[in-house]
Amino acid sequence: MQMNSSSATALHIDHVQTIRASDESGGSIMKLLMTVAIVLFGFASAGVAAADDAGTVKVYTEQCAMCHGADGKGHSVMGKKLAVKDWGDGKTLNPISDADLEKMIRVGKGAMPGFTSLSDGQVKAMADYVRAFQK
C-alpha cells in the first residue's frame, strides 16, 4: 500500500487524536510507559536481590552459623562456649552503626575472624542479613 503525504498526515493526526483521547480519559501513554518501566525495574532488582540473598545465606550458613546459629541467637554449641550474643535482641545490634557492623564482618572481633575476601557489597549484604534477625 502506497501512502501519499496527505494520507500520512491524516494517519498522524488520527494517532495524535487517539493519544489525546487517552489523555483525556485519565490514562496517559507516558504514565503507562513509566508504570511498565517501574514494574520491570522492580522485577530486575528483585532478581538481583534474590541472587545476592542466596549468596549471603550460603556464606552465613557455611561461615557464621556454627557460632551464631542459623537463627542468629547464638545457641549453638560453639556460640554458647564463646558467649555469642543474640542478634534477635535489639539491645545487641541497635547500638552498633552499620559502618561498625560492616567493619566487624570485614576485620573480625574477638574470636571471630574477619572476612577480607568479601566485596564491599557482600559485606553490606551480610550486615543487612544479620540485622534482619531482629525482625
Image (cartoon, rainbow, N blue to C red):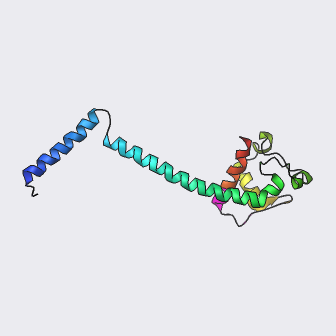
- The one nearer the camera, 61 or 6, is 61
Q: For the magenta stretch, what is the residue range?
A: 113-124
Give residue 101's position: percent from left, percent from top. Answer: 74, 52
Q: Residue at x 28, y 32 (%)?
A: 25
The image shows residue 12, relative to residue 110, as above or below, that is above
- The one nearer the camera, 122 or 99, is 122
Magenta-span inclusion, residue 108: no
What is the quadrant of the N terminus in the image? bottom left
Give residue 11's position: percent from left, percent from top. Answer: 15, 47
The furthest residue to the right = 81
Give residue 51's position: percent from left, percent from top. Answer: 60, 57
What is the quadrant of the C terminus in the image? top right
Q: Residue at x 10, y 55 (%)?
A: 3
- The one nearer the camera, 99 or 72, is 72
Side of 75 relative to 30 (left or right) = right
Image quarter of residue 89:
top right
The image shows residue 4, relative to residue 87, as above or below, that is below
Magenta-span inclusion, residue 123: yes
